[in-house]
Amino acid sequence: MVSDSGGFDDKSFNQTSYKGLTDAKNQLGIETGQVESTTTADFAKNIKSMVDANCNMIVTVGFLLADDTVAAAKANPNVNFAIVDSQPEDTLTNLKPLVFNTAESSFLAGYVAASQSKTGKVGTFGGKKIPTVTIFMDGFAQGVAQYNQAKGKNVQVLGWDAAKQDGQFIPGERSFEDVNGGKQTATNLVSQGADVILPVAGPAGEGGLQVAQASGGRVSAIWVDTDGCVSAQNYCKSIVTSVEKGMDVAVFEAIKAGKEGSFKADPYVGNLANEGTKLAPYNDFESKVSAETKAEVQQLSADIQAGKIKIESASQPK
């Protein structure tokens, strides 16, 4: 397995994907190797190091590794590859995309966020303007719009304009690791009135949690990729819920198929229906989210799965 520059302890998608690798090692009795990337320049050489180690399956983690993963898969047709969070345009028989329609679960998160807002403003920001980030922001904004329509309210979304596909992103080359940048971006949103924040920025999203924690209960956050109350326990009292991605299960199943000789390159698409993505428990907010809202969220989830509600996001997996 090759991480992106967030590393395997990022409280986010690298860490969850790595759990899939360790689960496979423990349950399937396979040998594993892993290498962490520090910068984008590491990707190609790190993938090559796994090829040179004679791995017969290599999992790369993150949209940013797509080009290098495709190149390696083309150069090594006898090695199976899987990539988390990317669906490359080149379809190869030895490269399986593991992707997630997090717009569905983010829609539910947006609805919950709007229900919790006292200022009538919620906010979101990203680490980079890439599809695996903006898909959360699209779903979130649409969920807020659904709440407004259902309740006759006008909760505003700061930090993302779905129509223009533009919004607030942490600046800089290493934005996903820039916790201070995340904190500054979240602070800007709060200063504009947002009292529920959705950071979609990997490790840098912790800056948003810091702002919520320091607010004395005035601001809360919604975490992404993992249940924040598990991966970022210190901040649990500030986390309403989380948009989970079952990357560990997807990675485990891909490795298992490889071991059993049944590897197929068809994309795995995690969604609400197969529980590849879902809302985490409300944890410390269990009593603060009303029974009415909880019931509405359950119904919305069912309606999305039944196709009654159409999620609009150009970033959704094909």
Image (cartoon, helix red, strand yellow):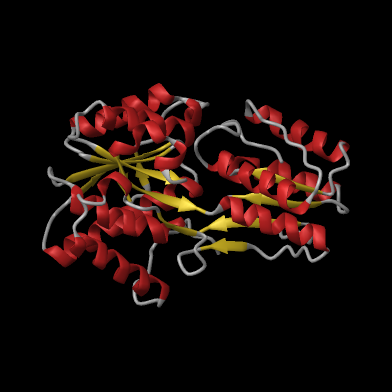
Could you say which is closer to the camera, residue 58 or residue 176?
Answer: 58
Residue 244, can we see it?
Answer: yes
Whole-percent x, y for residue 186 in the image: 30, 31
* Left or right placement of residue 72 versus residue 192 in this view: right
Residue located 73% across and 36% down the image:
34
Whole-percent x, y for residue 263 in the image: 77, 63
**Count of marks, rendered view:** 0
Note whether 92 is above or below 283 in the view shown.
below
- For the C terminus, give its image quadrant: bottom right
Residue located 67% across and 48% down the image:
23
Could you say which is closer to the camera, residue 212 or residue 173?
Answer: 212
Among the 4 quarters of the image, the one containing residue 272:
bottom left
- For the N terminus, give its image quadrant: top right
Residue located 50% across and 27% down the image:
177
Among the 4 quarters of the image, the one containing residue 279:
bottom left
Residue 163, can we see it?
Answer: no
Task: List the single residue furthest toward the top.
Answer: 180
Whole-percent x, y for residue 163 in the image: 32, 54
Residue located 66% across and 50% down the image:
83
Whole-percent x, y for residue 13 in the image: 54, 43
Could you say which is closer to the camera, residue 318 or residue 221?
Answer: 221
Could you say which is closer to the camera, residue 185 or residue 211?
Answer: 211
Note whether 197 is above or below 304 in the view shown.
above
